[in-house]
Amino acid sequence: MSLLVVGLSHRSAPVSVLERAALHADAQVKLLQDTVGAEPAAEAAVLATCNRIELYADVDKFHAGVAELSTLLAQHSGVGLDELTPYLYVHYEDRAVHHLFSVACGLDSMVVGEGQVLGQIKDSLARAQELHTAGRLLNDLFQQALRVGKRAHSETGIDRAGQSLVTFGLEQLASGTTVQDWALGKKALVIGAGSMSSLAAATLARVGVAEIVIANRTADRAERLAEILNEGASPTDVVARAVPMDSVSDELTRADVVVSCTGATGLVLTAEAVAAGRGLLAQPGAGEVPPRFGAGAAPEVRLPAGSAVEENCPLDLTPVQATPGFSLLGEAAVAGMAASELEQHAAWVDNAPRPQGSVAVVDPVQEADAIAALAATAAVIGRVPERRRPEPVAEIPRPAPSLFLLDLAMPRDIDAAVHRLSGVRLVDIESLAEASADAPMAADVDEVRRIVADEVAAFGAALRAAHITPTVVALRTMAADVVAGEIARLDGRLPGLDDKQRSEITQTVRRVVDKLLHAPTVRVKQLAAEPGGAGYADALRTLFDLDPETVAAVSRAEDSTTDEEGRGSA
């Protein structure tokens, strides 16, 4: 059996795809159960964070395992396999171990060096143990990953390379000033009471906000978090209180800062709710259509308010919000589309019905020209890429923000359209990904990479050595049985031996057998620990004609013991 990981992260996929592929708790449970129920996989664990979704499995066939795990990820995420596949990565055996250890150390995080991922790895292991989908391999792997991550943070300065996603997000909101100066005296609303929201609340309290309101669907968790924040607080410290979720709209009228991170599958705060709660207006130019993609793009067109949505697009593509009909003006809608599909849509655009009474609509000829340009791009590179950064446009002066929103949820909690509201500043996972791309790397990163490389080598050697242990145990068990049989036969031939003589003979025979087996078993363990040493177990079984069932029984006993120890230490 071999370790395989299939997944996608902020490094391989745009945030829009990650957001759609996010797995809620029930979907993760079903994915684990279906994975171990599939033929190639014997163990499974899911690592799902705000910027990655990874499925780990112990498989007996590589190609069948990749196909099965990819299909299951697509099935449970709700994103079609054809659309998901270009963004998936695959790691196998030592590369899979290296990947998880790097993740545990924060090397693969959006904010390099952050330590929150250790808690997420621990939760992932606990879930797999609870569902009995983690066996010896994944128990050992995830527990070692936790140790490697803790070692990296204790032995190096990797913490200086980056902060938690919460701290990084608050720095982006502060935009040029220190977080402490920006936060001083502000009133904060935290939506959610999970690990990320709790960290956000604690961070806000530490940097000096005056009040923190916790809103959560489960009232007990919100109240407990508020109690923790209030414990030992002096009259000048932060005041925390809990409110039910239906009070969010009221609290929004008072808050200066809102941090949201829930497990909701839909929006928690819409642009309309924020605008109504704060009495805000859309920024001038908010109704304009974004610039087109590619060569031959038409000039921007202002769309009439209240235009009806066109229907009967042959490709059944979802229109961009507030844009009549399908529009190439939203690049996410066409990312990954083949040239033939774009050309098919171009033909439809030429003859598509247009809203009646519109004073300004998208020109069908211009629309078809834009589609043709996109089709040419798709023909060259295979698909239309989704751009992470829009083309620069003329900046419209905005007033200083009076409401700061930090959305750390995946899928998003806060409507992206709130950035169009006057006096609102929004930072979300997508903008954090863009900002972190230019973040400086600390010198300690190289040291952590060396730690990871050493730990991967040690884990691989231990895993290969452990693979031969059941065979060695079975060999020694067989030798002990032979000794016992010969002593019993000696008793029949020499019944006059006294207890002292029988004991001396027994010890002598055992010492002879132990000395004969010692050097070969020690050496075979050393050889098995080296790369390519997996065949030594088979050679040992063949040379000594060991019963395969005896070896399997030893393996099952060891796995059972490991499972119990793993569940106790996770």
Image (cartoon, rainbow, N blue to C red):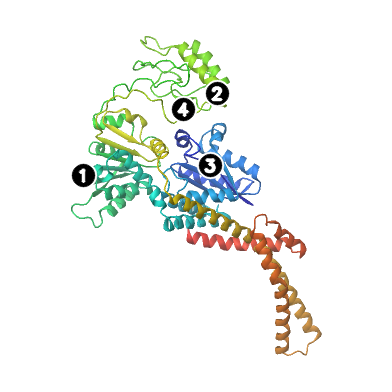
Between discs 2 and 4, the one toward the N terminus: 4
Q: CA distance from mark 2 to mark 4?
A: 14 Å
Q: Position of residue 104 (x, y in %)?
A: 47, 51
Q: CA distance from mark 1 to mark 3?
A: 42 Å
Badge 2 crowding class, 10 Å Cα cut-off, few under 14, some 14 to 19, many 20 or more, is many
Q: Hey, what amino acid is under mark 2?
A: Ala
Q: Quadrant of residue 51?
A: top left
**Residue ID for mark 3:** 7
Q: What label does residue 185 carry, if any?
A: 1
The image shows residue 217, relative to residue 284, as above or below, that is below
Q: Is 399 positioned to the left or the right of 291 in the image?
A: left
Q: Quadrant of residue 456?
A: bottom right
Q: Hey, what amino acid is under mark 1?
A: Gly
Between discs 1 and 4, the one toward the N terminus: 1
**Is residue 353 among the parts visible in the rendering?**
no
Between discs 4 and 3, the one toward the N terminus: 3
Q: Hey, what amino acid is under mark 4?
A: Ala
**Residue ID for mark 4:** 332
